[in-house]
Image (cartoon, rainbow, N blue to C red):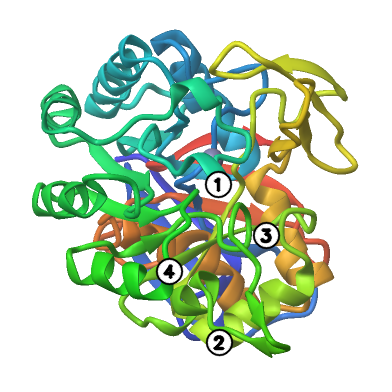
């Protein structure tokens, strides 16, 4: 039996201790706590999950080959489990995407991260809050298209981001959540009351909070309660934050964490094809172009569109949280690993250093938390 013992500061669910993780084949067979954490030991954390992104490295999500490329590239980002997201797009492209994710989720290839299924971010979004989504791609969730996505995904559709305030939106929330899909509010103009009704209908997640959300209305000098406030206040939902420091200012990341509590916060990248590559022009799902600037974000080259996504690798979301914004290792692991795992329902098999769990593990440098090695299902898939 193939066995390997990793020794270092282990980031467990509630503490950091110096100890060892024994990996046998694809699972963790033993956790040994030795002593309090050591100053200069390597840091061992569960692999990161990214449940909301549209591409990474040279790969987008348009074809099976592309998504397979993403799976091969993700260990470089420290991501061991992922669900790629498809924005609003034509029907045929959506069906292809669902089939590709379904095929990829059926079997992990050597050297690759695990595709846990798919995420549809659209097309059932609100026009006024479409952000970088192509305006001709938006649609209303009719019975037929809902049936189609459920059928094509065959149980592998993990997340649907929609605006419950579009016509038939609430019925779509009910239908998708009853089918076991996590429904996420996003690109929406819902009032706090409409949001609460959607939560009562089964909605349980929030897409990139603060991005494509209205500011608080002010009436006669009085600040009103708004959708993003309601998302933070409702303990029934988990909340995504793009942790690049540009989409959400660090102060708002901290504010969200305090209000919602760390257990409800999910770090995402919302990264685009080209992430990890040099600055340049790249193509989006809908055929439009954007400029990727590694010192900021991806901006559309179309007139009046603006920001379309990030160029943030997940490993940098982690170092942002810990090194720049002062979160503890335990809290950063919750946001990058345990919480997203709970959202997509894989928390009983991965995303923790625990005996019997899959050996999905990152080894980080002491001090800097730079990624040194990424292990997926016991296999070393990236070494720096
Ligand atoms: Zn997105």
Which residue occupies 59% across, 18% down?
Answer: 59
Quadrant holding the N terminus: top left
Task: Name the residue tied to disc 1.
Answer: 129
Q: From the top left corner, tell me how far across and down residue 231 is, in percent.
A: 45, 73
Can you tell which of label 2 and label 1 is closer to the viewer? Answer: 1
Q: CA distance from mark 2 to mark 3?
A: 20 Å
State left or right for residue 323 relative to residue 313: right
Whether the residues at callouts 4 and 1 have beta carbons within 8 Å, the answer is no
Task: Name the residue tied to disc 4.
Answer: 191
Question: Which element is circle 1 on?
Answer: helix
> What is the crowding at mark 4: few (fewer than 14 residues within 10 Å), some, or many (at least 20)?
some
Badge 4 or badge 1: first in the primary sequence:
1
> What is the crowding at mark 1: few (fewer than 14 residues within 10 Å), some, or many (at least 20)?
some
Badge 2 or badge 1: first in the primary sequence:
1
Badge 1 or badge 3: first in the primary sequence:
1
> What is the crowding at mark 2: few (fewer than 14 residues within 10 Å), some, or many (at least 20)?
few
Task: Name the residue tied to disc 2.
Answer: 259
Q: Nearer the viewer, residue 348 or 92?
A: 92
State left or right for residue 161 relative to residue 347: right
Q: From the top left corner, tell me how far across and down residue 320 is, in percent.
A: 76, 62
Q: CA distance from mark 4 to mark 2?
A: 19 Å
Q: From the top left corner, tell me how far across and down residue 97 is, in percent.
A: 35, 19
Q: Looking at the rendering, which quadrant does residue 94 occupy?
A: top left
> What is the crowding at mark 3: few (fewer than 14 residues within 10 Å), some, or many (at least 20)?
many
Question: Which element is circle 2 on?
Answer: helix
Question: Which element is circle 4 on?
Answer: loop
State left or right for residue 174 relative to residue 130: left
**Residue 318 circle label:** 3
Q: CA distance from mark 4 to mark 1?
A: 13 Å
């Amino acid at each position: 039996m193939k066995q390997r013992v990793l020794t270092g500061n282990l980031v467990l669910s509630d503490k950091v201790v110096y100890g060892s993780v024994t990996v046998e084949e694809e699972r963790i067979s033993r956790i040994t706590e030795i002593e309090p954490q050591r100053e200069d030991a390597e840091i061992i954390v569960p692999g990161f999950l990214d449940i909301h992104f549209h591409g990474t490295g040279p790969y987008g999500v348009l074809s099976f080959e592309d998504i397979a490329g993403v799976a091969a590239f993700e260990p470089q980002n420290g991501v061991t489990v992922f669900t790629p997201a498809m924005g609003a797009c034509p029907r045929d492209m959506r069906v292809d995407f669902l089939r590709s994710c379904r095929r990829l989720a059926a079997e992990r290839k050597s050297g690759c991260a695990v595709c846990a299924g798919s995420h549809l971010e659209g097309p059932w979004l609100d026009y006024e809050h479409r952000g970088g989504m192509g305006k001709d791609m938006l649609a209303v969730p009719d019975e037929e298209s809902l049936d189609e996505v459920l059928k094509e995904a065959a149980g592998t559709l993990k997340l649907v981001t929609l605006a419950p305030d579009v016509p038939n939106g609430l019925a779509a929330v009910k239908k998708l959540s009853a089918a076991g899909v996590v429904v996420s509010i996003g690109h929406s103009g819902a009032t706090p009351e409409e949001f609460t009704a959607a939560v009562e209908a089964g909605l349980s997640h929030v897409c990139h909070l603060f991005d494509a959300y209205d500011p608080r209305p002010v009436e006669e000098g009085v600040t009103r309660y708004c959708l993003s406030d309601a998302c933070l206040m409702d303990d029934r939902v988990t909340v995504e934050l793009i942790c690049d420091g540009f989409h959400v200012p660090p102060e708002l990341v901290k504010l969200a964490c305090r209000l919602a509590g760390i257990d409800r916060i999910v770090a995402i990248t919302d990264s685009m094809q080209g992430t990890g590559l040099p600055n340049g022009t790249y193509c989006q799902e809908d055929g439009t172009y954007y400029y990727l600037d590694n010192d900021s974000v991806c901006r559309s080259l179309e007139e009046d569109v603006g920001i379309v996504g990030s160029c943030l690798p997940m490993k940098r979301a982690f170092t942002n949280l810990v090194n720049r914004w002062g979160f503890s290792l335990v809290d950063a692991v919750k946001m990058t690993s345990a919480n997203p795992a709970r959202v997509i329902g894989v928390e009983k098999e991965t995303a923790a250093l625990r005996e019997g769990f899959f050996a999905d593990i990152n080894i980080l440098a002491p001090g800097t938390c730079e990624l040194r090695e990424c292990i997926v299902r016991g296999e070393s898939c990236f070494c720096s």
